[in-house]
Amino acid sequence: MGKKRFIPVAAPTLCGNEKKYVMDCLDSTWISSNGSYISRFEEEFARYCGVRHAIACCNGTVALHVLLRALSIGPGDEVIVPTLTFVATANAVTYCGATPVFVDSESYTWNIDPHLLEEKITERTKAIIVVHLYGHPCDMSPIAEIARRHNLYLIEDAAEAHGAQYRGRRVGGLGDAAVFSFFGNKIITTGEGGMITTNNSELAAKLRILKGQGMDPNRRYWFIEVGYNYRMTNVAAAIGLAQLEKIDWHLQRRQEIANWYKESLGNSDLFRFQGTQGWAVHANWMVSILIHDCTTDRRDKIMAALHDRGIETRPVFYPLHTLPIYRHLAPPGGLPVAEHLASQGLNLPTWAGLSREDISFISQTLREIVNNS
Ligand SMILES: *Cc1c(COP(=O)(O)O)cnc(C)c1O
């Protein structure tokens, strides 16, 4: 009997110069956090995002942490974040001793709702972190206007949105700074990795000091900050550079996959896709749908049935204010749009190696299971 195929929800696709560049690191013995691939990856990534500086880190979570530290966010401060995001967005705030303040989602794009943001600002608020959820850019103009008016830092958590565009501009340069992740399931990967992008040269210099143990750039082993070792290795950067060379192909494949899902599921009342605004280029990190009139319980059963048929899916993020670690920060039911999306939402397998037949099989199986549940 043939072994049943299992389709993961995400998987890296390494079909460019990854192996060649990694072998180059090994042959040259430049495998640690010095080496030419680091600066090449940083320069190329900055160019891609249309910003002046890119600073590589060993993952996206620490990139967020060191960025907030560099902006002097600390105890007593508040930072506005969407409740519908990966936990790392809020954890980075917590690491600094500051408090995340959660905002509800828009029901169409699922991103932070600009209309609900301003009422959360207090005299303690220092920054807004927006998250381009599942690859759809946030509505940056009204948010930037609010940030300007209240003198707040505006940070993009672009961990899920490499190459996404807001009104013709790539994410990464739309606020004071942005953070990307290159974890194995992201749009492009270095295994583990992260990047901070910014146009602010002073901030970039501070980030380089803080991520490299706080050492004075002009005096070795003289430490001027309590810094961190958050450096990326040359090996990871080698993989990243090869991935970045093919980012247009990765994004094209993801768009094609999203289109196939919409063709095969879009004409049904059973499903609603995460919306795409006319001004947005969606990076399609995870094609995401709501199952009509579904409870969390039924959604979880549908996911289990898909798993039995060899298809891995993920639930839409649990809103952070519903988790035990952040429950004390917002009342239950207080952010109803995100709670609704989370109860009905599902991420479908989305990665560059999937074929049209895979998408047909997934869609057909999903339809069948939903109809019979
Ligand atoms: C993946 C992710 C991160 C964290 O990145 P890591 O590289 O896994 O540490 C942060 N924010 C969001 C929204 C993410 O999806």
Image (tube, grey):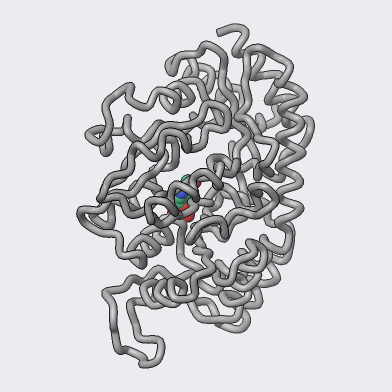
Percent position of residue 176, x then y: 48, 61
Which image quarter is the N terminus in?
top right
Percent position of residue 324, x then y: 26, 33
| Residue 311 seen in render | no
Percent position of residue 168, x then y: 70, 51
Residue located farthest toward the front when viewing the structure as drawn: 149
Q: What residue sits 76% from the left and 52% below the top? A: 249
Q: What residue sits 26% from the left and 27% below the top? A: 331
- Which of 30 and 6 lies nearest the eye of the viewer? 30
| Residue 125 seen in render | yes
Q: What residue sits 38% from the left and 56% below the top? A: 151
The vertical placement of 153 against 81, above or below, is below
The vertical placement of 100 against 271, above or below, is below
The image quadrant that residue 208 belongs to is bottom left
Percent position of residue 294, x then y: 50, 13
Which image quarter is the C terminus in?
top right
The answer to whether residue 187 is left or right of residue 304 is: right
The image quadrant that residue 231 belongs to is bottom left
- Which of 247 and 200 lies nearest the eye of the viewer? 200
Q: What residue sits 54% from the left and 58% below the top? A: 191
The vertical placement of 215 against 13, above or below, is below
Residue located farthest toward the top when viewing the structure as drawn: 372
The answer to whether residue 186 is left or right of residue 279 is: left
